[in-house]
Image (cartoon, rainbow, N blue to C red):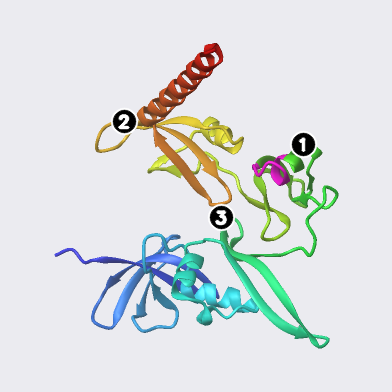
Amino acid sequence: MEKQVEKVFVKLNQAWQKGDAVAVNDTTYKVKTADNLTFEIDKQSEYLEMQKSPAQRFALGEAKERLEGAYISFAKLPENVQDAIVRGEEYLHKSAYPKDGVIKESVKMVQMVYSPTSGSRLDVQIKRKEEVTLAQAKAYNHQFTQAEFDKMVNEGRFVSFEGRSSNGESFTKLAYYEPKLNDIRTKSALSSSTYLYGQQLTQEQADSLNQGKETKITIKATKKGPLTYMVSYSPRAERFITKSLEKAKVKDMETKDAITVSGEKKRNSLATP
């Protein structure tokens, strides 16, 4: 009988990573990590944690450590907030503290993020006291233009821009205005390594979506055969917005019909004495 494989997190050399675990006996697991390191570990070990759901990207233990480093008690957060954090979702944390005899408010957006080169970390962005100005609108050594600033702040849309690291490496990022922080917020851009419904995007598709364009994408391997969708992307929610091509066509036809009908009604009303 084939043994059941469990998805786990293990803490090795002070860093949490994912692994697959198979029970050796009632007290021990045999674990294999993503970099093919294999070892046995006690089921009750403090360095072992079972994955709660497929959507969980980070260990609860790691999230607890990271948030407490940012002066946020992970244990005091509601369970649904804890679950959202280990899925890699944003959390807006508000707290009050006394200073100089008065109560001050602290507002910050926190999010667990992962990079293949640097590993996982907690991204923390503190709310500005005043709304960000054009001169202050900078990210990754990029100064946003007036057009980019207006698009984000005044139109509520996102922009794609080229950032640069301290050593001169360039990369694409997405940015939008976050009123909860009075500031510009950045997110990772889509790439040919991004998956949609189990299928990798082409670089052309990723570039189109990064520009805010609704893009036609065909998912080849589905139970119903190839299915085509009109796809857009929200960096704020870090979610794809999809609609079937058939529904998109029907909606477009309904819109055109409505315009035609209202136009006819308007012309008829003008012609009526």
Placement of 79 over or under 35, stated as above or below: below
Please tell me which residue lies in front, 151 or 173.
Answer: 151
Q: Which residues are magenta?
A: 151-158
Magenta span: predominant SS is loop
Q: Are marks 2 and 3 in contact (CB under 8 Å)?
A: no
Placement of 83 over or under 199, stated as above or below: below
Looking at the figure, which quarter contains the N terminus?
bottom left
Dot 1 amino acid type: Ala
Secondary structure, mark 2, is loop
Decide whether residue 59 is among the magenta residues.
Answer: no
Mark number, residue 147: 1
Q: Can you name the residue that lies furthest to the right here?
A: 135
Q: Position of residue 249 (x, y in %)?
A: 40, 25
Secondary structure, mark 1, is helix
Placement of 224 over or under 90, stated as above or below: above
Please tell me which residue lies in front, 8 or 36.
Answer: 8
Dot 2 amino acid type: Pro
Could you tell me which residue is drawn at 54 percent across and 52 percent down? 237
